[in-house]
Structures are given as structure tokens and as C-alpha cells.
Image (cartoon, rainbow, N blue to C red):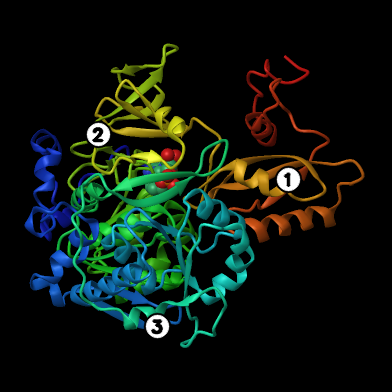
Amino acid sequence: MIPETIGKRPFAERVSPNLLDYERARAEFSWDKAAQTLSGLPGGRGINIAHEAVDRHAQSPLATHRALRWIGKDGTRRDFTYSELRDLTNRFANVLQGLAVGAGARVFVLAGRIPELYVTVLGTLKNHSVSCPLFSAFGPEPIHTRLSIGEGEVLITTESLYGKKVAQLRDRLPQLKHVLLIGDRGARTAIPGTLDFRQLLDAASPVFEIAPTAAEDYALLHFTSGTTGKPKGAIHVHGAVIAHHVTGQLALDLHPEDIFWCTADPGWITGTSYGIISPLTNGVTSIVDEGDFDAERWYSVLREERVSVWYTAPTAVRMMMKGGAEAARRYEFPDLRFIASVGEPLNPQAVLWGVEAFGLPIHDNWWQTETGGIMIANYPAMDIKPGSMGRPLPGVEAAIVQKTKAGGVDVWTEPGMEGELALRAGWPSMFRGYLHDDERYRKCFADGWYLTGDLAKRDSDGYFWFVGRADDVIKSSGHLIGPFEVESALMEHPAVAEAGVIGKPDPMQFETVKAFVSLKQGFEASEPLRRELLGFARKRLGAAVAPKEIDFLASLPRTRSGKIMRRLLKARELGLPEGDTSTLEGGG
Ligand code: PRX
């Protein structure tokens, strides 16, 4: 039996939560006051994320405090204090200066969770360039699309990723001026058209002064996906750091003495906002594990690193649940005091499993690439309703709305109504645009509300409950995948006439990518062709995005205007009612 609420936790006795009284915190909160908890650049020269995350602490007693503990795949540990991180990020900012990479230039990094990734993101911010971390499990096509849309001028990557995924794209990336390679094993072999990252870093000065930075200056570019068209490059500004900082305190309950582990990869925004920026602005020690998910490994990281606050994702929790709570109970986690999760719906069972396995419920929270930071959360000093995403952060106004024909919105004031989740525009980490796509950006707003594309409900206690997506994007293992990107890759195969891609519900990953294809004349559906298509898509898109299943159909259902009806493909796949098919070509 799942209880309706889980009372707030007794650990409040050990560490007093930052947010003790929700209503009061909301009433007293203002973003201006929140901004004052940061220092700003010396001499009133504005606000820069990297200064707040690193330099500010490097000039304080925290200078010798461990900022990052990196755990290599093989278990090697490397520690970086705040002052070491300041010097390394200064060096990288100087490397960019040396290459004449200026303010606003897009600097991409494609790497696993290695220390260089963290150094380049922060160094790029110091240089006033725009940082864009890419997920290393992307295949060449998603990498190419993002570098093209983002007009990447610099790419930092590893020698092996370059060889496997990037070298083949170079002649299709005319704007890419510099590729800096991180050698996989010590010295790098000279590869034409590339520079040696470590050599440049070693030769650069560890002294750098951050130029004046305005709160509205562009800082980060994160790609996300929509139903149609290419991926969308959401732009975030330096002033977003106020939200990164404060949400870390309120929703993740970060305290300076914490050892914090965010398991997300910086190739997705959680791994940047909460895997790089928020823990550092809050002066905690942040754990970075290069290794992939493995339940035993994760238990041992939690225990051996004495993690006190852990931020993870439902897929990982469900995978750990598979091993049973006994697996966790073999260990002790005396330091762990707060667990949070984000990215997909967290099953009520998973919330409770936290109690069984760790003696702590898992606190769900909600946000998006576009929101830049956590917007709705379950707080330590608040009762949890398992299955609910929680309540809006202080400073954040959330509502359930319905679009009107006139282009505005009706706001549902009565509880229990299902509609689109909307946020009152204006919090500091709100995205400032989709790169080169003003129209798509404008469409996200109505009557001063940002429309999230999620369907949700609010109950009479003000808790929000996720219902589903209003569009066709797919969520798999916490990663948002655009069906169009997958369809486009499949269409490049000579046998494929049409492709339609859906998210198929999955007990572990929430959804998996499933494709339906029809074949061109002269090609016949067969098992070898299915395997070939799966391999073809995987090679182009990478394992994180490629379909896991492909079915052949004689033709795909389309609307009269020619759009593939993914909704219908999904309904048929799941054996659900087909709904309104009046726009179906040849039907209705
Ligand atoms: O559909 C919601 C789902 O993830 C989407 C945002 O994905 P992305 O932009 O990749 O952001 C990742 C940073 C969190 C949302 O629109 N989502 C996120 N959190 C939850 C969720 N769905 C249900 N419950 C959540 N807690």
C-alpha cells in the first residue's frame, strides 16, 4: 500500500533544512534578495557564472576546500580544490583568448565526464563565450546538427571521440575553426587540423581577469527536442546563476559541508545546472563519476564518498530497485540525508523504495531545459505525496492553463483540472531564446505565461501532478528525444520511404524509441533489413537516441496535409482507442 503522504523527515534533527516553512519562504522571497546572496564580479562589474562558482570561493577560506572529486572509470580518484579549479579554468580562458575566440562565440565540448569537461565549461564562461556541452553518446548526426545550429567555433573533444564521430564531419562544419583534442593516453598523436588541449592548457597563464559581464549576457546553450523540426538550442544567460544557486539550497537543501552527487551527464542540462554550477556556487564538494550506471558501483560511491545529498533520475532508481532493497541494506549510508530525482515521472513505489533502501524517501522535482533550474519540488521540510512533483519554488508561479483560440490562456483556479503546466515568465534562469528560431520561442509564451508542453494537474494543497506530454517528444532514461531527428536519420537509408517514431512505454526507461518504416519499391521487409536499419540508425544517432525497435508497415498513417500521425501509430501499438481520426488521409 502506498500512503497518500509521507511526513517530513526526522533528519531535520541533524541538519536544519534551508526551507523550513514553505508558505513563509514564498511570502518573503524575491529574486532581488536572492541575487544578493551572490557576490557579483569585483568592482560592481556584473555577474558571471564562473566567478560565482569558482573564483569567489578561491578568494575565501574555501580556497583549499575540495570542489570536485573525480572518480575515473577504473576507480582512480582526483581532487580539485576551489583554487586549483580557479587556476585551471583561468588557463582555459587564456587558451581561448590565445585563439582569439571572443565573447558570444560558441565553444562546444564533447567528452565523457572527465575533469577537462568541467574545466572547459567554466573557462568558457570566464571568457564570455557560450558553452555547449554535448552528450558523448551522441552519434555523428546529432553532433553535426547541434554544431551547425550552434555555429560552433571551437570544439574540445577526446582523441577517440574525434576519430569515431567528428573527423568524418569536418568538411560539413565550415564554421568550426578550432578542434582541441584531449589525448586518451597521455601524449596525443598529431592529427591534422587539431590542436593539443593539454599542451595549450599547460602553456597558458593561470591568471585571468573576467571581463565585465551583464546578467543578460549569453552563457550556455543547451539543445532540446520538439515534435517537429530540428533540435532547439535553448539559450541561457549569466544571470541564471541566481536560480542555480538558490534552487540548490531550497530544492536540494545544499549546505556548505555537503558532499553532493548529481549523477547526470553535463551533455544534458541537469548535469550542467546541478552537476557543475549549483554545487560549486554553494561551495560544496561535488562528486563526478566517469563510470556508467552500475548499481553496485553506485552504492559504493554513495558509501565511500560519504555522499550527503544525492540527485539522480527515476530510471536509475528503478534499475537499483530491480536488485531489491536488500542490496542497499548490505551497506550503511550514515551521511546520506537527502535524495532527489528528476527527469521523468517518479513512481510512488520508487519514493517508498528510498525509505526501504536508505531510510529516506526520494524527493521528486520537475523542470526543463528551458527553465534552466528546478521549478517544482518536494522539499525536505514538507510532507511528500508520492507520485507528485511537489510545489513551486519560492519565486516561481506555476499554474494549469488552457490555450484559448484567441492566442491567450485561461488559468484554471480550481484544483483537479487537467491542462498545460505554465510558469509565470521572469525567473532568472528562464531561457532567453531558441537560437535562430524566434518564432518557436514566441510560441512558448501567452499572456505572460511560459507554456511548458507538459500536461499536469494541481491538487487542493497546491501539489502538482504530472499527467503527460502535450506533444510527441520521447523521454527515455531521462533524456528527451525528438522523433523528427530519428525519422530523418532513418529516411537516409536507401530502403526507407517513410518513417514514424514514437515513445513506447517501458517499465525501466519510462519510454523507449520505436520506429515504424515503410519501404521503397523494390525493397522487402525482412529480419536482415530490420537489423541493418537498427544498426544504421545506431551508427548515425548513437545509442542514446537510436530506435530500439523497428516495425515495417505498408504505409504510415498521415493527415490530409501529409503529416505522419504518430499519435495513431502509438495508439495502435498500445492497442488503445484511435481517438479522432477525422484528419486521417483517406479516412474520417
Ligand atoms: O516532460 C517533463 C519531463 O522532462 C521534460 C524536460 O526534459 P528536459 O528538457 O530534458 O529537462 C531535463 C531537466 C530536468 C519535462 O517537460 N520531466 C522532468 N521532470 C519530471 C518530468 N516528468 C515527470 N516528472 C518529473 N519530475
Toward the viewer: 208 or 445? 208
Q: Residue under circle 3?
A: 199
Residue farthest toward the bottom in the current orientation of the protein: 187
Q: Is residue 192 left or right of residue 109?
A: right
Give the residue drawn at x 26%, y 62%: 126
- Marks 3 and 1 sit apart, C-alpha to C-alpha, by 42 Å
Q: Is residue 532 left or right of residue 242?
A: right
Instruction: Say which element carries label 1.
Output: helix
Name the image quarter holding the C terminus: top right
Asked if marks 1 and 2 touch (Cβ < 8 Å), the reply is: no
* Nearer-N-terminus badge (2/3): 3
The correct choice, above or below, for 70 with respect to 508 in the image is: below
The correct choice, above or below, for 123 with respect to 273 in the image is: below
Residue farthest toward the right in the current orientation of the protein: 522
Q: Residues within 10 Å of mark 3 (few under 14, many from 20)?
A: some
Q: Residue under circle 2?
A: 426
Q: Residues within 10 Å of mark 2 (few under 14, many from 20)?
A: some
Q: Nearer the viewer, mark 3 or mark 1?
A: 3
Q: Residues within 10 Å of mark 1 (few under 14, many from 20)?
A: some
Asked if marks 3 and 1 touch (Cβ < 8 Å), the reply is: no
Q: Position of residue 582 (x, y in %)?
A: 68, 15
Residue type for callout 3: Gln
Q: Nearer the viewer, mark 2 or mark 3?
A: 3
Would you identify the image quadrant in which residue 284 lies?
bottom left
Residue type for callout 2: Gly
Ligand 1 within 8 angstroms of badge 3 C-beta:
no
The correct choice, above or below, for 190 with respect to 531 in the image is: below
- Marks 1 and 2 sit apart, C-alpha to C-alpha, by 40 Å
Would you identify the image quadrant in which residue 563 lies?
top right
Q: Is residue 205 left or right of residue 186?
A: left
Q: Residue under circle 1?
A: 491
Give the residue drawn at x 57%, y 77%: 192
